[in-house]
Image (tube, helix red, strand yellow):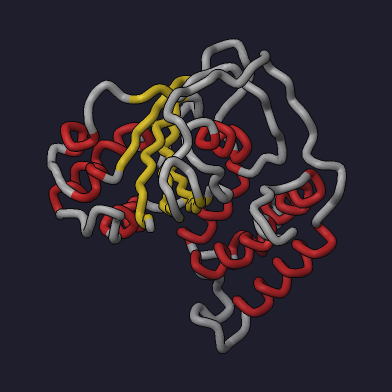
């Protein structure tokens, strides 16, 4: 892992446009192809688009250049059109529509620079989860509040930059449900398989921040030589407050050689 000392992102508010090159020439057709497939009679939901299907379709905008990129301005404009397309939105299940709305909010195609900190929490993961075990041993926790007056809220760019300052560079963040969070936390860690008490405690601790806003995101990462002699990998969960200015990140290492 990278050093756990946190440095501020230097400078005040500076909003930049997304990269000038447009990736929409490949991502939009890929999205449309996924939607066509999702509406086919042979698809799992038939003419109705399921959450898993819209998630796959929207992934076209995150990985269209062969790596994690986020949404550019041309893609954002297209997503806005689809957000306001009533027949399209009505073809989504309730959970699929929620995923689309969450994805749209997170990926606003801006890359703000903001002066703030994600600080280590005072207590150990075990004390915060209320249980000791593999999940606690494998966790690193940071949190921070974007100050008033900067005009910035947590989005894709802010979350990626924030995690990159205390962990390896992650992939893009994606919305998850509490059910998906529990499944993620229940998975194998570098220290073993978490206990039920740990998972329940970690879930409560994480969702305490996003409880009213339902803003939960996750990303994965991998690195060679980041504080260990070989390969390491893991995932990070970001819980964001209702005003989108407080962020709690729980980073979990899942592999090391």
- 222 or 176: which is nearer to us? 222
Question: Residue at point 51% right, 42% down?
Answer: 168
In the rendered view, tell whether residue 209 sits above or below residue 36. Answer: above
Q: Quadrant of the N terminus?
A: top left
Residue lying farthest bottom? 42
Estimate the x, y position of residue 182 in percent, counting from the top left: 29, 54
Question: Residue at point 38% right, 42% down?
Answer: 251
Residue lying farthest top? 149
How many tags in the picture? 0
Estimate the x, y position of residue 138 in percent, counting from the top left: 29, 45
Q: Is residue 254 left or right of residue 218?
A: left
- 57 or 100: which is nearer to us? 57
Question: Residue at point 69% right, 57% down?
Answer: 61
Question: Residue at point 72% right, 74% down?
Answer: 33
Q: Quadrant of the C terminus?
A: bottom left
In the rendered view, tell whether residue 194 sits above or below residue 40. Answer: above
- 4 or 108: which is nearer to us? 4
Q: Is residue 49 left or right of residue 229?
A: right
In the figure, residue 121 lies in which quadrant?
A: top left
In the rendered view, tell whether residue 225 sits above or below residue 160. Answer: below
Estimate the x, y position of residue 38 in percent, counting from the top left: 60, 76
Estimate the x, y position of residue 244 in percent, counting from the top left: 50, 29
């Amino acid at each position: 892992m990278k050093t756990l000392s946190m440095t501020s992102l230097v400078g005040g508010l500076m909003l930049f446009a997304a990269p000038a090159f447009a990736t929409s020439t490949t991502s939009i057709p890929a999205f449309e192809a996924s939607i066509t497939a999702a509406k086919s009679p042979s698809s799992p939901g038939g003419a109705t688009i399921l959450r898993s299907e819209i998630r796959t379709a929207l992934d076209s905008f995150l990985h269209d250049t062969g790596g994690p990129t986020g949404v550019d301005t041309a893609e954002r404009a297209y997503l806005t059109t689809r957000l306001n397309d009533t027949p399209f939105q009505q073809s989504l299940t309730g959970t699929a529509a929620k995923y689309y709305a969450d994805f749209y909010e997170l990926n606003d195609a801006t890359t703000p620079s903001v002066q703030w900190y994600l600080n280590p929490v005072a207590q150990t993961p075990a004390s915060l989860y209320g249980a000791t075990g593999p999940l606690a041993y494998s966790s690193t926790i940071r949190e921070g509040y974007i100050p008033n007056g900067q005009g910035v809220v947590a989005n894709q760019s802010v979350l990626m930059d924030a995690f990159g300052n205390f962990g390896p560079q992650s992939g893009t963040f994606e919305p998850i449900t509490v059910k998906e969070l529990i499944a993620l936390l229940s998975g194998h860690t570098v220290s073993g398989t978490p206990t039920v008490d740990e998972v329940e405690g970690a879930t409560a601790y994480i969702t305490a921040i996003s409880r009213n806003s339902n803003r939960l995101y996750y990303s994965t990462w991998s690195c060679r030589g980041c504080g260990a002699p070989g390969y390491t990998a893991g995932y990070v969960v970001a819980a964001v407050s209702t005003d989108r200015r407080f962020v709690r990140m729980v980073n979990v290492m899942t592999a090391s050689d």
